Image (cartoon, rainbow, N blue to C red):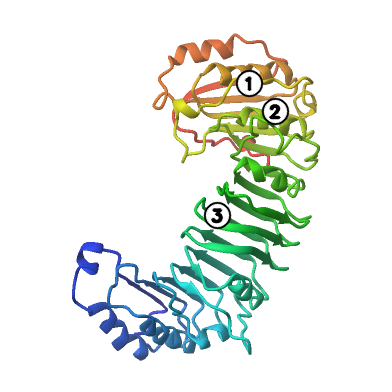
Amino acid sequence: MWLPNLEYTSTSPIRTYYSNSPALVEFIDKNLPLHRAPVIERLSLDLTYSRHTQPEHIKRWLEVAVSRHVRDLDIHYYSEDENVLPSSFYTCSSLVILKLSGVTLVDVPSTAACLPSLKTLRLQDLTYQHDDSLQGLLDICPALEDLSVDFVREHSMGEITFIVPTLQRLSLFMADEWDLCGYVIDTPCLKYLKLEDWNYWSHDIEIKDMPELKDAYVDVVSPVLKSVIGSITSVKHLTICSEISKSGGEYSGGFVFNQLKHLKQCVCKENSSDLLGQLLKDSPNLRLLDISHMEDHGYDEGNEMVCWNQPSRVPECLLSSLQILRWSRYFGRPQERDIAVYILKRAPRLKKARIIADTQEHDVPNLEMITELALSSRASSRCELVFVKGPPVWKDKEDCMC
């Protein structure tokens, strides 16, 4: 009864969902009001498969948690347009971390609502009662620093706004089922951005200036690529999994990444090599190039990268700054070989090239891959070529150039 961390879970669908026993609800109802700790450091309610839990139960438990000055709150509960957050929740001054999954977010109470200590907010698969329900919650979080929102459940919304002056980290996932007009990101203090926009429905994107941005992860469909690229030119570390469409109209350069030192690009998509060539031209001070297949994207014969169209002019970064080339999950296909050979021949400052072969997904003779690259000429007499068979694990301290 004095434990500061409380976790209640009903994650077994066989033993819980199909059971008629209300044991979990009765247990929490009986014991949580009697809890003696003056502060509940963490309360986790994973009620995904609890068929007996009703919104009024959760409201009652949260009122107890607020009275015990809860600091970390995690709720998993799938509701159908039912509010599970009591009015007292919106005035919880002690709450620092909040994670909500599956619940319905309604309008924030108009008076006295404030979460002054909240710094981390995770929202996954929520239903939003109104288009401005999300921004209403963000407006009462004056100290928010870390925000993650996954738009997963099929839903229709108008324009979504993320206006948070204090935010330093932002992670957004837009599933393709969402019917949205667009979104606006206005976060002037942002240092880290992770944007996964898989929504091919036509939508507008406006990203305001983010001068403090240092690190970005971008996985977006080609129609929105230009809007995103033009807003993150201050990054020092960029991870990107995207492509330029065959028409090339979405992104054809014109931006300069003067601060970019480390570029990691996934080449799992058909026209990713064109994007790689453009980013090399736009990154004059690049020092580390990491080419890979992201772990979630397996080898796909029907969606492999097309042939490498080498740039008409050698990118400045190859001539003057590139020091390390890393390639994980190298399959040894002709288009990959051409890219690797092109870089080795034109990077006089290159110190190390590490190639990790993936022979599990694509069976190419290891000796053949080694021979093709080992016999190719290199612009740098100091370049060490390391060829490894195995998973992409990087351990050398000098490989970290962030």
> Marks 3 and 2, Cα distance to the nearest angstrom?
26 Å
Kindly state the secondary structure of the residue where label 1 is placed: loop
In percent of width and height, residue 160 lies at: 63, 64
Q: Tell which circle, 1 or 2, labels the residue nearer the N-terminal end.
A: 2
Residue 113 found in image quarter: bottom right
The answer to whether the residue labelled 1 contacts the one labelled 2, judged by CB atoms less than 8 Å apart, is yes
Instruction: Give the class, few, some or many, for how many residues have Cα within 10 Å of label 3's Cα (few <14, many ≥20).
Output: some
Q: Amino acid at mark 1?
A: Trp
Asked if residue 88 can be seen in this view, the reply is yes
In percent of width and height, residue 233 lies at: 76, 45
For label 1, the residue is: 308
Residue 305 located left or right of residue 38: right
The relative height of residue 152 versus residue 101 in the rendered view (above or below) is above
Residue 83 found in image quarter: bottom left
The answer to whether the residue labelled 3 contacts the one labelled 2, judged by CB atoms less than 8 Å apart, is no
Between 400 and 132, the one nearer to me in the picture: 132
Rendered residue at 69%/19% (across/down): 382
Between 251 and 145, the one nearer to me in the picture: 251
Asked if residue 37 can be seen in this view, the reply is no
For label 2, the residue is: 277
Rendered residue at 50%/35% (across/down): 393
Rendered residue at 53%/32% (across/down): 268
Q: Tell which circle, 1 or 3, labels the residue nearer the N-terminal end.
A: 3
Kindly state the secondary structure of the residue where label 2 is placed: helix
The relative height of residue 128 versus residue 219 in the rendered view (above or below) is below
Instruction: Give the class, few, some or many, for how many residues have Cα within 10 Å of label 2's Cα (few <14, many ≥20).
Output: some
Q: Tell which circle, 3 or 2, labels the residue nearer the N-terminal end.
A: 3
In percent of width and height, residue 226 lies at: 71, 43
For label 3, the residue is: 173
